[in-house]
Amino acid sequence: MTTDDSPLRGLPSVDAVIRAVLERTTTASRGAAAESARQAVMEVRVAALSGAPVPGFEEIVQQATRFLARDAGGSLRTAINATGVILHTNLGRAPLSVRATTAVQEISQRYSNLEFDLETGRRGSRHDHGRALIRRVTGAEDAMVVNNNAAALFFVLQALAAPGGVIVSRGQAVEIGGGFRIPDVVAQSGARIVEVGTTNRTYARDYAAAIDASTGAILRVHTSNFRIVGFTTAPSAAELAAMAREHGILLIDDLGSGALIPTEQFGLAHEPTVQESLRAGSDLVLFSGDKLLGGPQCGVIAGRADLLERLRRHPLARVLRVDKLTFAALSATLLAYAEGTAVEEIPIWRMLSADPASIAARAGTWVSAAGSGEVIAARTMVGGGSLPEEGVATSVAAIAAADTDAMAAGLRARPTPVIARIEDGCVLLDPRTVDPVDDATVVEAIRSVTA
């Protein structure tokens, strides 16, 4: 019971909110409505005890209804990325092409030959899928797919280098995201890390001096999520490959980003490609499927056929294997590269090559929907642990607001969340990272939060 001066005065009962929620939906169970009502009332109660005013009954019911809709659809939802970061790690990195999503849909709705040899009628190997296409687009002797690139690195080190020493430049002993660090991955694999050189300068002679009878591999890690500039030196992949061959050890090149086409054509800095590393003599090249490749999350291991055969026979191959949906999406993505249509088909390349005039016009439409603001010049960043600090010119809708956090939160609260960024007192929305088919949804969201 609350007194007249209680901060909880006016707080409705949970039962009243449940009844109101059920009146607004014909599909929700009473249990689901009750849970959403309790969440909404509890949220208001906590806020009121902290000094916030108690909102009106209708507002509380609307919040409960939003909770109900959110929970009914599960926690994983589609969202519109208007942040201006193409490979946004928190938003799922690379969106798939139409060909890839179609392949996933077809494979998911039917049985498949995932582990069935159609020629012999006997059990086959899932590791056969994708091999031919990876070889075709990279020039590798052989390849296999695991669940992500960190897994690929761990797998290769554990299966082929442990318990020997793995030589890594100090400038490449990096943190790869989520708090995971190259030295930790090496240690967990059972190998022993041997750091050489300095943060900014490592010479071929540093690697040579560290090689001994216990050395298992040289590990070259592409610093894809940061950049060291200025007074720097690092040996090329070709130099390290020659050294590795001379001493009978492996050169493992962890490229990470998985670029298969020249990034210079988009006005970006050069990103080392898988093909370049293999031609330079790397024994194995490791890269992600969901970064500059533009496919599903996975890790690809490409290189020498004898090493890949050893990996396929290793017990970890089963632990780290991927499912039929990943193979379907990856194969469809690789086909675009094989057929020379990647720039037209794969969303990340379409975004980078989008017409600047069209982007500016779309930003202007969004500003008009807000009723205020302006179109300003900005940069769309590549992101996702690829091409650090690299981006292309863009135009964004800059919408001023007294409370930019509240406006951004309102955009996120839409049935299809719209994710923007805040800079200099404005909410910024970049059309380059938004599929044009979503423009009407963005306009509706802007109008709802600026009304």
Image: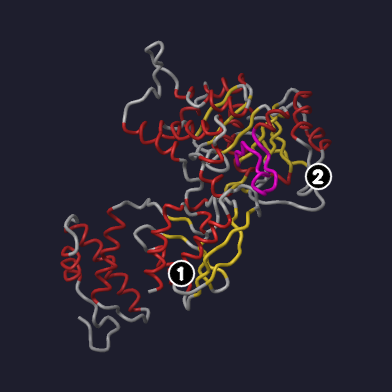
Q: Percent from the top left, x then y, of residue 279?
A: 71, 28
Could you say whether the residue bearing mark 2 is in a helix, strand or loop? Answer: loop
Q: Quadrant of residue 282?
A: top right
Q: Quadrant of residue 449?
A: bottom left
Q: Amino acid at mark 1?
A: Ser
Picture layout, residue 429 above or below residue 180: below
Left or right of 269 in this view: 415:
left
Q: Decide which of 129, 345 is in the foreground and name it.
A: 345
Left or right of 261 in this view: 4:
left
Q: Which residue is mark 1?
A: 368
Task: Please identify the quadrant where the C terminus is shown.
Answer: bottom left
Residue at the spot 47% in from the left edge and 71% down from the top edge: 405
Residue at the spot 64% in from the left edge and 47% down from the top edge: 266
Q: Percent from the top left, x then y, of residue 421?
A: 52, 64
Q: Is residue 29 magenta?
A: no
Q: Is residue 150 visible?
A: no
Picture layout, residue 393 above or below residue 326: below
Decide: few, some or many residues near mark 1? Use Cα within 10 Å; few <14, some 14-19, many ≥20: some
Residue at the spot 53% in from the left edge and 55% down from the top edge: 432
Q: Quadrant of residue 18?
A: bottom left
Mark-to-mark CA distance, 2 and 1: 51 Å
Residue 233: numbered disc: 2
Part of the protein shown in magenta: 257-274
Picture layout, residue 329 above or below residue 384: above
